[in-house]
C-alpha cells in the first residue's frame, strides 16, 4: 500500500486525467470510476484529493467511500 501525506493526496483531485482519491479514517480510496465523482467533484459538495472523514459520516449515502478500492494510507 502506498502512503500519502495530506499534501500528496491533493495531487489526486480527478482533474486533467489524474485519478480521484479521497481519504477516510486514514485509508485512501480511488473513486475515479464513480459517476458521482465526475472530474473529482462530488455533487458540488466535496472535492477529491482530500480527507473526507468528518464530512462522510454526516452525509446521506447509499454507497460508502469504503465500497471503493483501497489504494493506500494517509500518514
Image (tube, grey):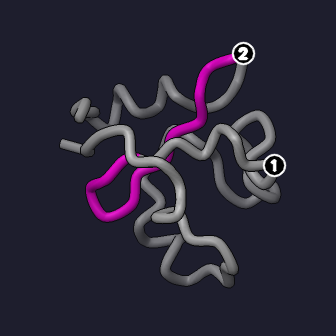
Residue 4 lies left or right of residue 55; in this view the side is: left
Residue position marked by numbered label 1 in the rendering: 35
Q: Are marks 1 and 2 in contact (CB under 8 Å)?
A: no
Quadrant in the picture for the C terminus: top left
72 sits left or right of 42 in the view: left
Nearest the viewer among 37 and 52 is 37
User: Does dot 2 land on a helix, a strand or a loop?
Assistant: loop
Task: Label 1, secondary structure: give it.
Answer: helix
Q: Is residue 53 left or right of residue 18?
A: left
* Disc 1 from disc 2: Cα separation: 16 Å
Which mark is on residue 52? none
Is residue 26 one of those drawn in magenta?
A: yes
The earlier-in-sequence mark between 1 and 2 is 2
Q: Specify few, some or many for label 2: CA neighbours under 10 Å numbering under 14, 14-19, or 20 or more.
A: few
Q: Position of residue 57 (x, y in %)?
A: 49, 80
Going by the image, does 18 lie left or right of 2? Answer: right
**Residue 45 found in image quarter:** bottom right
Task: Using the rendered view, name the quadrant where residue 43 is placed.
Answer: bottom right
From the top left corner, tell me how far across and down residue 53 is, in percent. 41, 66
Q: Nearer the viewer, residue 42 or 64?
A: 64
Question: What residue did someone put label 2 on?
Answer: 16
Question: Which mark's residue is nearer the viewer, 1 or 2?
Answer: 1
Q: Indicate the position of residue 59 as horizontal and vertical percent values.
A: 62, 80
**Image quarter in which the N terminus is found:** top left
Q: Residue furthest left?
A: 75
Amino acid at each position: 500500500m502506498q502512503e500519502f501525506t495530506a499534501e500528496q493526496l491533493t495531487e489526486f483531485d480527478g482533474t486533467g486525467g489524474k485519478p480521484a482519491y479521497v481519504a477516510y479514517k486514514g485509508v485512501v480510496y480511488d473513486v475515479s470510476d464513480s459517476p458521482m465523482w465526475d472530474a473529482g467533484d462530488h455533487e458540488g459538495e466535496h472535492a477529491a484529493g482530500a480527507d473526507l472523514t468528518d464530512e462522510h459520516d454526516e452525509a446521506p449515502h447509499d454507497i460508502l467511500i469504503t465500497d471503493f478500492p483501497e489504494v493506500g494510507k494517509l500518514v
